Image: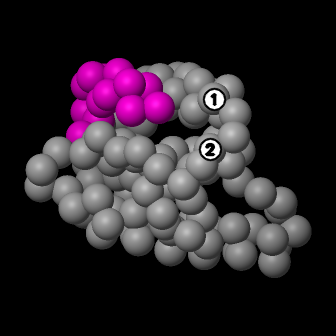
Amino acid sequence: MRSILKQLNDVVGIKGSLAVTKDGIVIASHLPRNLEEDVVAAMAAGAIRSTERALQRSGLGDFTRFTLVASHGKMVFADTGPAYLVVVMDRNVDVGPTQIEIQSAAMRIKQLGEIRV
């Protein structure tokens, strides 16, 4: 899984990536030194839980992918089945062209099968 994350991070504009459980437990990560793994994972878990609750209450079901835009960067969250792929990006990067790479990484993680923490 780490090799999938490393390959994803080679895409222009992507700063780092990690796979986390809904509870924020890190399965694998490939983040730069300036991003603390546990902080990113905790933030991701909160965003995932909040988004899932809101979607369920609205009757929209589960998400497959969503993007959070902040003043200094973006995070893309993709459901991979047993875990979630979280991708940290530069603020000014157009997410559109990178979506194919992110979705491809998510599908490869999903194909890995059962994930043990």
Rendered view: 106 above or below 76? above
Residue position marked by numbered label 2 in the rendering: 115
- Number of numbered markers: 2
x 59%, y 25%: residue: 108
Residue extending farthest to the front is 116
Q: Is residue 106 left or right of residue 9?
A: right
Verify CB contact (< 8 Å) between mark 2 and mark 1: yes
Q: Quadrant of the C terminus?
A: bottom right
Where does residue 41 sit, x and y in percent of width and height? 40, 63
Q: Residue at x 47, y 50 (%)?
A: 27
Q: Reply yes or no: does residue 117 show up in magenta.
A: no
Q: Residue furthest left?
A: 34
Residue 58 or residue 108, whichever sits in front = 108
Q: Any mark on residue 71, and which?
A: none
Q: Nearer the viewer, residue 43 or 74?
A: 43
Crowding around mark 1 (Cα neighbors within 10 Å: few <14, some 14 to 19, many 20+) is few
* Amino acid type of the residue tagged 2 in the rendering: Ile
Question: Taking 38 as reference, is 109 above or below it?
Answer: above
Q: Which residues are magenta?
A: 1-15
Q: Pinpoint residue 115: horizontal percent, then vertical percent.
A: 62, 44
Measuring from the top left, give residue 106's x and y in whole percent: 57, 33
Q: Can you tell which quarter of the image residue 111 is in?
A: top right
Which residue appears at 60% of the width and 49% of the height? 116
Residue on which the image places disc 1: 112
Furthest residue in direction right, as rendered: 59
